[in-house]
Image (cartoon, helix red, strand yellow):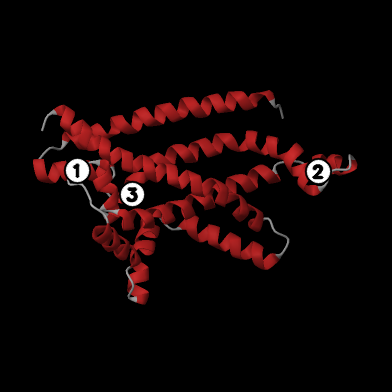
């Protein structure tokens, strides 16, 4: 294989990695907020259940969570849900045999759904702790000032608290987002053809080990882009001083 062919082969895998990254963010960012509110709830059963879930999710390795979500339904109920998704797609869709991104996605759809669920739950719990820390860092005096001005609890949160919380959580959220793109490599534990899996396939079938190291270039370029974008976001929020 030529250098260009190997680059394209790895790029197809990196598109799968980016899809995992994007779906995780779209699901985990909003899901983390209700989890954070439950963790701060005055109703103790809700609070303790939320904190226990967050503790378990944060304490168990993400790879193990992927295994649990992918394999446990079939082991417990004799119903391999994600394998059924694959069979349904194979029966009802014409899958191209060109080794492209569409083929990678369609032939691994069930596993991708399991990965989406595992990643979204895992990162939602991490984001919830960031949200909780940001919300609790706002002094009670600012809430009281809003109430004195005749604002409702929701108005105080939207007009006074929210902007400050966003500014404070951007740096830790940025770190988690950058970690997320690297964590997508864990999807290859259930044979999802993300970029590391593609490189390992080249090592196994073509006896080429250097593409495995070449994958680092893809990650570095994307992390560099994320760093620039998130840095600009922090600068835009700098108008709001603590």
Left or right of residue 157: residue 21: left
Q: Position of residue 123 (x, y in %)?
A: 49, 49
Q: Is residue 170 left or right of residue 62?
A: right
Residue drawn at (17%, 33%), measured in percent from left and top?
6
Residue toward you, 235 or 54: 235
| Secondary structure under the numbered disc 2 in the rendered image | helix
The image shows residue 150 at horizontal and vertical percentages of 89, 43
Q: Quadrant of residue 118?
A: bottom left
Binning the other alpha carbons within 10 Å of mark 3 as few (below 14), some (14 to 19) or many (20 upward) gives many
In this rendering, the answer to whether 12 lies above or below 190 is above
Check whether the beta carbons of the residues at disc 2 and disc 3 lie within 8 A of each other: no
Mark 3 lies on a secondary structure that is: helix
Q: Are marks 1 and 3 in contact (CB under 8 Å)?
A: no
Q: Residues within 10 Å of mark 2 (few under 14, many from 20)?
A: some
**Disc 1 crowd, CA 10 A, few/some/many (<14, 14-19, 20+):** few
Instruction: Name the N-terminal-most of marks 2 and 3.
Output: 2
Q: Residue at x 55, y 47 (%)?
A: 127
Label 1, on which residue? Answer: 99
Vertical arrangement, residue 66 with respect to residue 11, above or below: below
- Of label 1 and label 2, which has the lower sequence position? 1
Looking at marks 1 and 3 on the same chain, the residue that comes earlier in the sequence is marked by 1
Q: Which residue is mark 3?
A: 186
Vertical relation: 161 (above or below) 114: above
Instruction: Give the label on residue 143, or none.
Output: 2
Seen from the viewer's position, the closer of residues 116 and 53 is 116
| Quadrant assignment for the C terminus | top right
């Amino acid at each position: 294989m030529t250098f260009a062919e190997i680059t394209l082969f790895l790029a197809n895998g990196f598109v799968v990695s980016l899809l995992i990254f994007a779906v995780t963010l779209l699901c985990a960012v909003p899901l983390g907020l209700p989890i954070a509110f439950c963790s701060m709830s005055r109703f103790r059963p809700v609070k303790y259940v939320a904190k226990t879930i967050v503790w378990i999710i944060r304490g168990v390795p993400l790879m193990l969570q992927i295994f649990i979500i992918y394999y446990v339904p079939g082991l417990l109920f004799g119903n391999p849900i994600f394998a059924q998704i694959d069979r349904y797609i194979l029966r009802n869709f014409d899958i191209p045999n060109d080794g492209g991104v569409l083929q990678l996605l369609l032939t691994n759809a069930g596993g991708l759904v399991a990965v989406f669920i595992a990643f979204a739950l895992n990162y939602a719990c991490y984001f919830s702790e960031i949200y909780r820390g940001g919300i609790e860092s706002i002094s009670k005096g600012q809430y009281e000032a809003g109430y004195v001005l005749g604002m409702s609890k929701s108005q105080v949160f939207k007009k006074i608290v929210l902007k400050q919380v966003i500014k404070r959580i951007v740096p830790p959220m940025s770190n988690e987002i950058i970690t997320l793109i690297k964590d997508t490599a864990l999807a290859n534990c259930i044979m999802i053809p993300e970029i590391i899996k593609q490189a390992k396939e080249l090592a196994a079938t073509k006896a080429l080990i250097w593409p495995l190291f070449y994958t680092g270039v893809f990650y570095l370029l994307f992390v560099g882009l994320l760093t620039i974008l998130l840095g600009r976001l922090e600068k835009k929020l700098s108008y709001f001083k603590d």
